[in-house]
């Protein structure tokens, strides 16, 4: 991996990983590695997830009851933990998503005041 | 608590599986196996720190549960003020009387132990027991039930009333 390639990737903002995990699990249960891959692929490899940071986040979400965990077998027939969204987590995802939209909108308005919108 | 233990017991295996899967992915993308593994480990980050942070997530669980219990308890007390008053009063009286009794015994024992002669009994106002006794009186004034205990102090401690 070249340094140029690394520079084009963006570090994940604090606290957004939880939101991305919840959104990823909306598509169905997945194991840890698959969640990390899905976030990278769906962000077109722009978001750089230090994959290890996924685990404290997953445990935090389990503790809050937003996701559940069940044993299953992964695609290569190995035992794996599958994480799935709970009803509570689904609700939380809606709350977090609208919070995120508000914040992103507000920051965008500050960064690009009305007159300069032609660029985008 | 059992869920926490189960999750943490499996953590190391989960991390190993994760790095294993990433290594496989890298090999499928055409990396030589040794390089694929190094890349996977690098991408995962610091395993020790991850394990520590994950453990930290659960370490505050009991504290949060305790706080919830306390809040529930307080809400219930506010809901039934009659019960609260009775409970508070009986606790105050109970603890107060026990404390008074203990203090009386201690000052009595201290007086007879540290000053074996007749000085303290004759002099009465030695520096240690006088403030204690006044503290007891202060604590218990207003509780008629304790007057009995106080009235015995001069007899045991040897102080003039």
Image (tube, coloured by chain):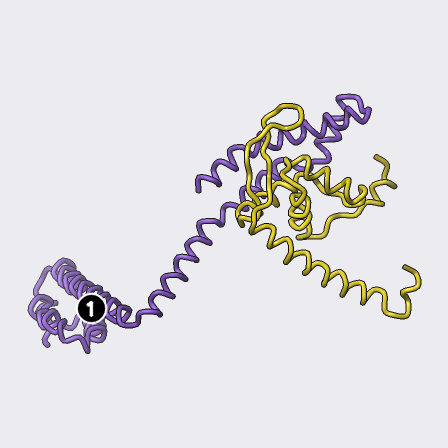
Chain colours: A yellow, B purple
For image coordinates 51% across by 45% down, the residue present is: B58
Quarter assignment of residue A53: top right
Left or right of B72, for residue A51: right
For image coordinates 61% across by 51% down, the residue present is: A90
User: In terms of depth relative to the viewer, which is nearer, A16 or B135?
Assistant: A16
Left or right of B52, for residue B149: left
Residue annotated with mark 1: B93
Q: Is residue B5 visible?
A: yes
| Image quadrant in which the C terminus of chain B is located | bottom left
User: In terms of depth relative to the viewer, which is nearer, B143 or A101?
Assistant: A101
For image coordinates 19% across by 68% down, the residue present is: B129
B92 up-or-down from A30: above or below: below
Report x, y in % for residue A100: 70, 58
Pointer 1 local density, CA inside 10 Å: few below 14, some 14–19, many at least 20: some
A13 up-or-down from B29: above or below: below
The single residue placed furthest to the top in the displayed view is B33
Report x, y in % for residue A62: 55, 45
Report x, y in % for residue B63: 45, 52
User: In terms of depth relative to the viewer, which is nearer, B62 or A74?
Assistant: A74
| Image quadrant in which the N terminus of chain B is located | top left
Dot 1 falls on a residue whose secondary structure is helix
For image coordinates 90% across by 70% down, the residue present is: A115
Quarter assignment of residue B47: top right
């Amino acid at each position: 991996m070249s340094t140029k390639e690394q520079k084009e990737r963006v570090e994940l903002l604090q606290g957004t990983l939880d939101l991305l995990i919840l959104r990823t699990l909306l598509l169905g249960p997945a194991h840890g590695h698959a969640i990390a891959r899905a976030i990278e692929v769906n962000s077109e490899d722009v978001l750089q997830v230090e994959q290890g940071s996924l685990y404290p986040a997953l445990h935090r979400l389990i503790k809050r009851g937003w996701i559940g965990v069940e044993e299953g077998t992964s695609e290569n027939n190995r035992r794996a933990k599958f994480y799935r969204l709970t009803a509570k987590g689904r609700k939380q995802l809606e709350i977090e998503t609208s919070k995120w939209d508000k914040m992103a909108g507000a920051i965008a308005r500050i960064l690009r005041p009305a007159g300069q919108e032609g660029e985008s | 608590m059992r869920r926490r233990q189960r999750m943490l017991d499996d953590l190391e295996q989960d991390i190993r599986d994760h790095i294993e899967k990433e290594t496989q992915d890298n090999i499928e993308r055409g990396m030589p196996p040794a390089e694929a593994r190094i890349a996977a480990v690098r991408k995962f980050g610091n395993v020790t720190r991850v394990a520590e942070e994950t453990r930290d997530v659960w370490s505050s669980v009991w504290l949060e549960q305790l706080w919830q219990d306390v809040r529930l308890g307080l809400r219930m007390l506010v809901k039934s003020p009659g019960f609260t008053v009775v409970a508070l009063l009986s606790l105050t009286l109970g603890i107060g009387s026990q404390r008074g009794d203990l203090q009386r015994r201690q000052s009595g024992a201290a007086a007879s132990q540290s000053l074996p002669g007749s000085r303290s009994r004759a002099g009465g106002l030695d520096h240690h027991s006088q403030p204690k006794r006044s503290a007891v009186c202060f604590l218990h004034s207003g509780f008629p039930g304790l007057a009995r205990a106080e009235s015995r102090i001069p007899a045991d401690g040897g102080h003039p009333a």
